[in-house]
Image (cartoon, rainbow, N blue to C red):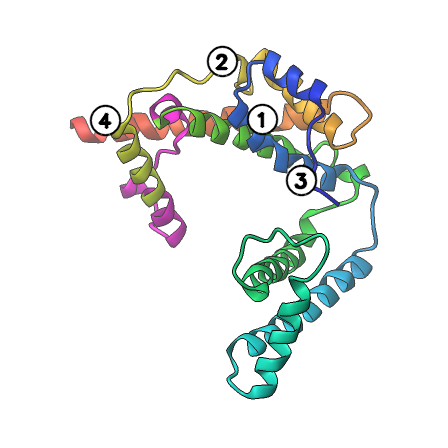
Amino acid sequence: MKLPDFTADQRRELTRLGLCPEQIEALRPVIGRVRLWIRPPAARNKTRAHLSETLKHAKALEKRLNALETMPAPDYRLAEDLLEERYFARDPFPMDGAATMLASFLPRLRAICEAADYSLSELNDVGPARNRTGNSAPVKRIWEALVSGWGRAHSPVGSSHFVRVRVPAMTNITDEAAREDSEIAEMLADARAKPAGPPYPEALMPSGGAFKDVVRLLYSAAGYTKGEPKRAIESFTAEWHVDRREALDALNLGIAAATD
């Protein structure tokens, strides 16, 4: 199965709604995530078994191929050479862009292992469609992709009002907080090195008129046939307003503390 994509008509509609190309590309992976939330329910134990078996065999193959790549014994070297010769003798020639078969294949195999492992850990978050079509999580992913795409297209200054603000005196510093601080510092350094970008479009804010149309189009691209996912949009918008008020309150507290 290939990565889900927009049709030409859907891309034109997204452009008409005010999205830049970077936002459209950032939204492509989200189609698959939305699809997970709206698909018909499946047996969890069977799904978990499929993922576990995939992970087990992928890890076993990775271990075997690593041995072929690293062990100096003649039998390992001959096995690798035979595989290598036949791999590149295929017709059509494999366009892998790597010097060796293993240099091309092992990173992909490791990516499969990581994907299976992550999917097992996330399996409980993918619920039956009948219980989850009103959940805000897919809409939140859409919002994050819109902001991320805009940030890639323009200077972070243009998106700086999306940064979460913490007051160190009121917050326990954790590894996650330290990571966010590092990311924010990097964004600010990048912003100082670039001219200010345009402000994020109001129409694409969760309270804007075009945002609902973008969500509806994403759900449609994922196979949702019931039009606009109204409950999911309303749930996310309510959460977003709360988060924004809390961020502004934290900012005001920080400014007050700095000016005392």
Measured as percent of width and height from the top left, residue 171 is found at 34, 44
Measured as percent of width and height from the top left, residue 194 is found at 28, 26
Q: For marks 1 and 4, give the CA distance.
A: 39 Å
Where, by quadrant of the figure, is residue 236 drawn?
top right
Q: Secondary structure at mark 4?
A: helix
Q: For marks 4 and 2, give the CA distance.
A: 28 Å
Measured as percent of width and height from the top left, residue 115 is found at 63, 56
Query: Mark 4 vs mark 3: which is more N-terminal?
Result: 3
Residue 227 in view, yes or no: yes
Residue type at tag 1:
Ile
Q: For marks 4 and 3, give the CA distance.
A: 41 Å
Task: Say which of marks 4 and 3 sits in front.
Answer: 3
Measured as percent of width and height from the top left, residue 169 is found at 27, 42
Circle 1 Cα neighbour tier, 10 Å, few/some/many (<14 / 14–19 / ≥20): many
Q: Nearer the viewer, residue 221 or 204?
A: 221
Query: Mark 2 vs mark 1: which is more N-terminal?
Result: 1
Query: In this picture, is 28 found above or below 203?
Result: below
Q: Is residue 182 left or right of residue 218?
A: left
- Residue 69: in magenta span: no
- Asked if the residues shown at circle 3 and circle 1 are in contact, with their CB atoms under 8 angstroms apart, the answer is no
Query: Mark 4 vs mark 2: which is more N-terminal?
Result: 2
Where does label 2 land, which residue?
202
Instruction: Give the quarter of the figure containing the C terminus.
Output: top left
Task: Say which of marks 4 and 2 sits in front.
Answer: 2
Where does label 1 land, which residue?
24
Query: Mark 3 vs mark 1: which is more N-terminal?
Result: 1
